[in-house]
Image (cartoon, rainbow, N blue to C red):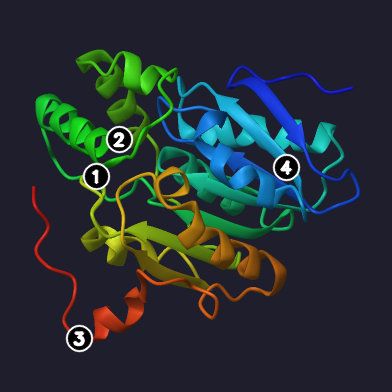
Amino acid sequence: MSTKPPCLMTVWHAGKPEAPALLLLHGFGASHRWWVRMMDRLTQDYQIFCLDLRFRQTLPMMAEELLEWTRQKHLTRLSILGHSLGALLGMYCAAQAPQMVERLILINPAIAIPERSLWQWLRRCRQARAISCHPPAKDPWYRSLSPQTCRVFLKSLRHSPLIAPFATPTLVLWGSRDPLFPLAFAPHLLHEFQAVRLLAIEGGHSLMYEFPERITPAILRFLANGDGQQQATPGTIEARRLLVQGWPPTIDQ
């Protein structure tokens, strides 16, 4: 019997009970609905815990609560698939419990926060919404994108301490047209990891909903054997190669 922590609203459990465990962590203002286009394929090989989260405290505190909840569920080994702020939360989980988190997949992680005003962030959020194709209409992010929601989002980011480098094998999938966290931010992320593969995907901020067919094969291959590149679909490039060629471009503040 496990008790849900304050940061956890709902748990959607699917897949085979005997299969490896995979936690899905959505971003700020989103919900489990953002994973629906990948769920059928993921549940064929994994036991899925799709969480609805409250981002009302610091990310390290949320990570502690989630890790304690997984221990109560007797999940001694698991992988994490996170998007945006959920990806950053996954990084804190891996840093706090490296013996528990086997693999980490990050989609457009919320990192390297530039100094923008609240209204600049609100405009960027609306640009991200415009890029997404037919987003889930019932989510709060799309019902009430307001200065208050952006203020909570920025507080979660700016009041979370730096993460110590960790060795969990990690795959990063980054939309090349993400207006919130541009691909140019990627070098800020690389020093956090000892084992990371970074793939740039043609798309916006919410790749799992926009282009699940482009990222699901890479995710499944990485979970199976640690390699996300060989089955990457058209529209995917290896971002490390661009780093060598003078990339990234200037960050738009």
Mark 1 or 3: in front is: 3
Q: Which residue carries the number 2 mark?
A: 158
The Cα–Cα distance between marks 2 and 3, rounded to whole angstroms, is 31 Å
Q: How far apart are marks 1 and 3 (CA)?
A: 25 Å
Amino acid type at circle 3 is Gln
Q: Nearer the viewer, mark 4 or mark 3?
A: 4
Q: Earlier in the sequence, mark 4 or mark 3?
A: 4
Mark 4 vs mark 1: in front: 4
Q: In this view, does 251 lie to the left or right of 55?
A: left
Crowdedness near tag 2: few (<14), some (14–19) or many (≥20) residues, C-alpha within 10 Å: few
Disc 3 residue crowd, few under 14, some 14–19, many 20+, Cα 10 Å: few
Disc 4 designates what residue?
48
Instruction: Decide which of tag 2 and tag 4 comes sooner along the chain.
Output: 4
Q: Residue under label 3, please give it.
A: 245
Residue type of the residue flagged with mark 2: Arg
Q: Residue 113 carries which label?
A: 1
Cβ atoms under marks 4 and 3 closer than 8 Å: no
Check whether the beta carbons of the residues at disc 1 and disc 2 lie within 8 A of each other.
yes
Depth check: 134 or 88 in front? 134
Q: Is mark 3 on a helix, strand or loop?
A: loop
Would you say residue 126 is visible in this rendering? yes
Residue 92 visible: no
